[in-house]
Amino acid sequence: MKKIILFALIAFQFSCNSDDSETSQNNTPLGKLIKIETTFTASGETDVVYNSYNYNDSGNLSEINSEIDNTTTFVRYSYNDEGQIWKENLSDGSFREYQYTNGLITSITFSNSDTNIVLINDSNSQLIQSKYYNGSIFLSEKNYTNDSSGNVLSIENGTSLTTYTYDNRNNPLYAAYQNQEFNKTFHVFALVPPTNTTNNIISKSGSFNATLTHTYNTNGFPITTQEVLPNGDIRSVIYTYQE
């Protein structure tokens, strides 16, 4: 379980729900996300993952370090001339590359496999489909619906369909990848929900079900989150921002 958790959280964190109370750090609007501490409680076992976020001199996210059981891994980002992420370098030596057409990500390739992902965007520049290939052999596809704010409303994958509802608050992960097309691509990967939407998920229903609640600071960013699954498993999150 720990390997699955670590892979999922090194670059992908889940989103949040709405509650008006404030119980933790309360930062200024300029405070960037610098740490997420996630505690998983499942079947009597507890795992804690620490993700730290580092930024370059231009204010762009440059690296995420993830620690679990004293083991640290990382993902490092490279930017193209337009200021968009085009490459992720992972601590195991592998990398992912993002190809752009007219400013939109249209494909993703992997250094350690023949898998490639083709992305289809609509006339509003919203991601509506991802197709998965092993070399030139088609494997599967996912279909997405979105609202006008850029939140993913549904993900359909064959016989699997999950729908999402959102609050109207700020998603710290969307803000960390500010103005990045990269934000639209997180949920194309296996087992990853739409983490980097404009707002925060408050419920998942269908093939995957969960209810999420959290507290906010005065700037409308979450400071704590709790996600409860139907089987009783819990994910608890604490967010830390720059002072």
Image: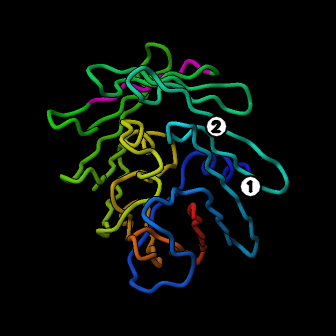
Query: In terms of depth relative to the viewer, which is nearer, 40 or 35?
Result: 35
Counting from the top left corner in percent of width and height, residue 35 is at: 62, 59
Q: Amino acid at mark 1?
A: Lys
Disc on res. 2:
1
- CB within 8 Å, label 1 to label 2: no
Please identify, in this view, whether the residue under mark 1 or under mark 2 is nearer the observer: 2
Please state if 11 lies on the left or on the right of 185 as rendered. right
What number of labels is visible?
A: 2
Is 211 magenta? The answer is no
Counting from the top left corner in percent of width and height, residue 38 is at: 64, 65
Q: Is residue 226 visible?
A: no
Residue at horizontal 36%, vertical 21%? 100
Q: Residues within 10 Å of mark 2 (few under 14, many from 20)?
A: many
Q: Quadrant of the C terminus?
A: bottom right
Would you place residue 139 above or below residue 161 in this image? above
Counting from the top left corner in percent of width and height, residue 12 is at: 54, 49
Would you place residue 5 above or below residue 138 in this image? below
Residue at horizontal 45%, vertical 43%? 186
Q: The residue tagged with tag 2: helix, strand or loop? A: strand
Is 117 magenta? The answer is yes
Disc on res. 75:
2
